[in-house]
Image (spheres, helix red, strand yellow):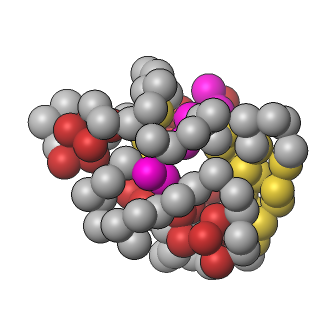
Amino acid sequence: MPKVTYIEYNGTEHQVEVPVGLSVMRGAVNNAVPGIDAGCGGECACATCHVYVDPAWLEEIGLPEPDSQEASMLGFAAAAEPNSRLSCQIKMREALDGLVVRLPDGQH
């Protein structure tokens, strides 16, 4: 099963197995990783599952389409950066085994 490493703002790491097909957000919520609020439950409607994708993974993950709902919601994310994504929009697949995401200081 592929693994994701979630790194909290304070540097604490959580390595979690996330089943293929589940979102990176759901993997965090199901494993009580602090820092991902997921207020809308993964509907791409709140930006409280905002993460920074490690630069080594950007090519594999990609960025949201410029006019997409995700890109619009990232406008509401606290401290969005060029490598920001909503973790509810990243679906796990085998190719993402080892993915590293960092969490912002806060989600609001």
Q: Is residue 99 visible?
A: no
Direction from residue 59 to residue 54 in the image, left or right: right
At x 82%, y 56%, the residue is: 14
Direction from residue 6 to residue 69 in the image, left or right: left
Residue 51 falls inside the magenta stretch: yes
Direction from residue 92 to residue 7 in the image, left or right: right
Q: Return the residue nearer the eye: 14 or 18.
A: 14
At x 17%, y 43%, the residue is: 68
The residues colored magenta run 48-55
Of all residues, the one furthest to the top in this rendering is 82
Which quarter of the rendered picture does the N terminus lie within?
bottom right
> In the rendered view, would you say 27 is above or below 70?
below
> In the rendered view, would you say 10 is above or below 94?
above
Quarter where residue 97 is shown: bottom right
Residue 72 falls inside the magenta stretch: no
List x then y, in percent, for residue 6. 72, 50
Quarter where residue 64 is shown: top left
List x then y, in percent, for residue 65. 23, 37
At x 63%, y 41%, the residue is: 103
Q: Return the residue nearer the eye: 64 or 106.
A: 106
At x 62%, y 27%, the residue is: 55
List x then y, in percent, for residue 32. 71, 70
